[in-house]
Amino acid sequence: MTKGERYKGVLDYFIAQVPIAETELHYTNPFELLVAVILSAQCTDKRVNMVTPALFQAFPTAEALAASNSDTVFSYIRSISYPNNKAKHLVSMAQLLLSEFNSLVPSAVDDLVKLPGVGRKTANVIASVIYNQPTMAVDTHVFRVSNRIGLTTNAKNPLQSEKQLIAHIPEDLVPRAHHWLILHGRYTCLARTPKCEACALTAWCKYFQKQNKSQINYPLKTNTMAKKKQNVKAKAPKKVKAKKAASPSKPKAAAKKSTKATPKKAVKKAVKKVVKKVAVKAKPKKVVKKAVAKKPVAKKVAPKKLVAKKVAVKKVPTKKAIVPAKKVAPKAVAAKAVTPKAKVNKPEVAKPAAPKFVAHTTGLNVGDLAPAFKGMDQNGNVVDSAALAGKTIILYFYPKDDTPGCTATACSLRDEYQHLSDSNYAVVGVSGDDEKSHKKFAEKYSLPFPLIADTNHEVMKAYDVWGQKMFMGRVFDGVIRTTFVIGADGHIKQVIKNVDTANHAQQVVSLG
Ligand code: SF4
């Protein structure tokens, strides 16, 4: 995968799934955002949002803040990290705003960094959020996520990361890309344990592929050719897996038995035996060929080293399993018994009784009379439900042209279009993209059916598929992916809310 493809995949995904990405800091004007961003250094946005209402009320303007002093400001921000320094910075910053910039927050990064408490990251945030400039603020999340996915290569500091990201991300997307990466790092690609199993970027993520946790098929592999390839691929891994699965299970079993008798020596011997067996098995040509993909250097590695590594790994869990139980448990108990914090924390844990967010779903049901619809398609033709009377209409709503899931859905329907057409089906896609975008999308994938450019969401609203949804902890309005199958009599025959994007045509037909 080229870097360009990686960037495209990631950006397309975010464009479709997180069309609105904004800072989580609360503010109503540039001055307030500047204050909030200064306070947010080494501190959470949530904490900052707790103190800023009172702070902004006391100091609504640069003049008011400049006329104050750090001790007074400190009393408002004492719960923030580094309150002493930040209080001094805020007052000095306000004074410089007054004297140098006529109380206005400057737009140029070079001017912004002159303000006390404003570093390059803060300046980039202000320039991007307030003035919509293509500046990329690289904080710890952006730095980590970009590096893991492979958007940056060998970036050793935020500046290097910033330069690489700016070089690849289209200017108009840079302000949003900053928030996408932050939000992804904050809620999914966590620093210690990234939630790869819940992440939709695995297909483009270098880190994930290195970890070799699983193989994700790019959604476009939905046509017949792709399926054939998948079938061929699917056969090979089974044998490899079977052999690989056999090898690790043996050392485990051997290690378990031996640890009961003589822990260290027995484990070493057991593992040595298994490794020898594996090495012997690895010699035949067939096995070597299959293993080449993942362990091309297997022959060169000396068996002894392998043994050492494997034994070392085994040692750790056995020691931990036996020893730490005694050491850790008393500490935890003691801490809870002595420190009052533990007692205070308990009731806080019970607090998350907040209601779970439920994404919007259409209120239309099977048997309802389907609302009439009309709209312009990619060729400038009017698509009118009245003109399709007598046909079974597959009316499918999707978020965004040329994004993985939406492309898979469209290609699935395209591949079965002849069959659907012969069976008296009409296929109509609907999204909020304009005609130009639809045209490009339809031409790129040779889509034979119309795509309605529902830019004002009229058709979506008629079918009640425009509403709130959540992604990465953020709630926003968007189209809810839904397909309606409308019978020749004009009534709804099917409502498909859990769209199988890669096999959607088959899903529609099998449900029908
Ligand atoms: S796959 Fe894992 S490492 Fe990669 S971006 Fe997603 S959460 Fe992060």
Image: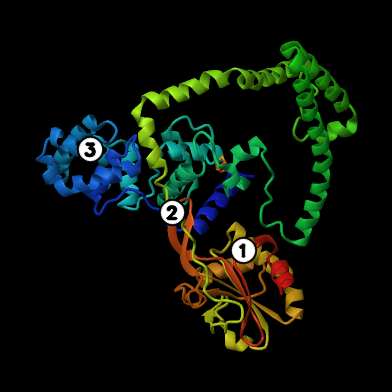
Q: Position of residue 175 (x, y in %)?
A: 40, 50
Please tell me which residue is depicted at 63% across the width and 86% down the height of the picture: 388
In this rendering, position of residue 472 left or right of residue 381: left
Asked if residue 344 is positioned above or below residue 18 in the image, the reply reads: above
Residue depicted at 46% across the width and 37% down the height = 143
* Quadrant of res 287: top right
Disc ID at residue 498: 1
Q: Amino acid at mark 3?
A: Ile
- The amino acid pointed to by label 1 is Asn
For residue 61, say whether it is visible: no
The residues tagged by marks 2 and 3 sit, at their Cα atoms, a distance apart of 27 Å
Dot 3 or dot 1: first in sequence order is 3
The crowding category of the residue bearing disc 3, from other C-alpha atoms within 10 Å (few below 14, some 14 to 19, many at least 20), is many
Q: Quadrant of ligand 1?
A: top right
Instruction: Say which quarter of the image contains residue 80.
Output: top left
| Residue at 79% across, 14% down | 269
Rendered residue at 75%/80% (across/down): 423
Instruction: Depth check: give the residue in front, 68 or 272.
Output: 272
Q: Where residue 14 appears, x then y in whole percent?
A: 51, 53
Residues marked 3 and 1 touching at CB (< 8 Å): no
Tag 2 secondary structure: strand
Question: What is the CA distance from the residue labelled 2 to the residue labelled 1?
Answer: 21 Å
Residue beneath label 3, please? 77
* Residue projecting furthest to the left: 67
Give the residue pinned by disc 2.
474
